[in-house]
Amino acid sequence: MKLYDESIKELLAGIDMSTAKKLDIVNADWKDVGDHNLILRADMAYELGGGIFPAVSAMAVTCNDEFVNTDEVFLIGPDLNEIKEDIPYARIAIIKVAEDSLGDGNTLYNAIRKIEYVRYHINPEGYMTRISASNNREPVRVGKEAIEKGLDFAKVGKLFIDTYHENKNIEAVKLIFITAKDVNYNGLLQQAKHLEDITGTIDHIFKNVIMDCGSCSLQKICDEVEGLRELHFSAQK
């Protein structure tokens, strides 16, 4: 699983991790309220990535210990109890799986999508995520009462990691929450789109195993990403 590795390098190169704080998630327990996580505007403290602000969501899968070898949650910028108004936001997830654990062909694509869809099943009390997969946006409405009860990114991150690990193929998760204002969110968005293009290309390859690469709209992605052409040729065989 090296399909995302070069893109992960580029993504992390654009983030100043020297300013990141590693959060203690050992005892960071918080309730997941499932489908009942509705926060009305009157009950919210603020929105992360609301309105005109960026709200970037990026996910990549790897087998490389260089990127992630244990569960970790990092924060760049103010924590939830320090935020007083709507601000930009990004959440980056780098997921480590065992080599060859996801299969190949459509099995590989479906396994990656299953990991991605975890985010639809995480509902920390007082932290309402509103996902728009079509434009990689993931704004969050944060409740006043939850802030008063002590909600922070350590608790949110712990719930994310616990839910990811319900998938037996996942070995470790690195989460990076970003709320700092002086971050290149547009650059992060472009990287997030590129990661999604890679996933989409995997699906395209196995739905169109006989095709003219020269006329394919995804040729640029195949040229750039190590392993995609090999997937295509194996599909043709």
Image (spheres, rainbow, N blue to C red):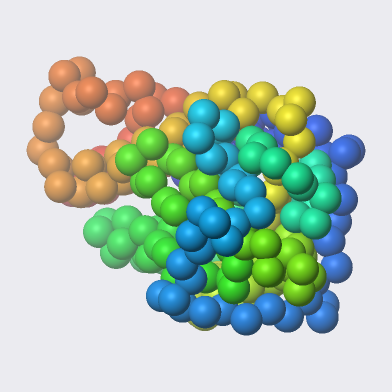
Instruction: Pick out the residue farthest to the left.
Output: 210
Where residue 87 appears, as percent x and y from the top left, is 66, 37
Q: Is 39 positioned to the left or the right of 216 in the image?
A: right
Quadrant location of residue 215?
top left
Which one is in front, 131 or 189?
131
Instruction: Pick out the residue farthest to the front.
Output: 42
Residue 81 versus residue 202 in the image, above or below: below
Where residue 7 appears, as percent x and y from the top left, is 56, 35
Residue drawn at (44%, 53%) of the image:
130
Which one is in front, 40 or 54?
40
In the rendered image, is residue 99 in sight?
no
Q: Is 159 positioned to the left or the right of 23 in the image?
A: left
Where residue 71 appears, as percent x and y from the top left, is 73, 67
Residue drawn at (77%, 47%) of the image:
83
Residue 228 versus residue 59 in the image, above or below: above
Residue drawn at (56%, 79%) of the image:
32
Q: Is 210 positioned to the left or the right of 34 in the image?
A: left
Residue drawn at (35%, 30%) of the image:
222
Q: Is 151 positioned to the left or the right of 231 in the image?
A: right
Residue 216 versus residue 17 in the image, above or below: above
Which one is in front, 141 or 209?
141
Q: How many marks?
A: 0
Which one is in front, 172 or 162?
162
Where residue 12 appears, as percent x and y from the top left, is 69, 37
Quadrant location of residue 88?
top right
In the rendered image, is residue 85 in sight?
yes
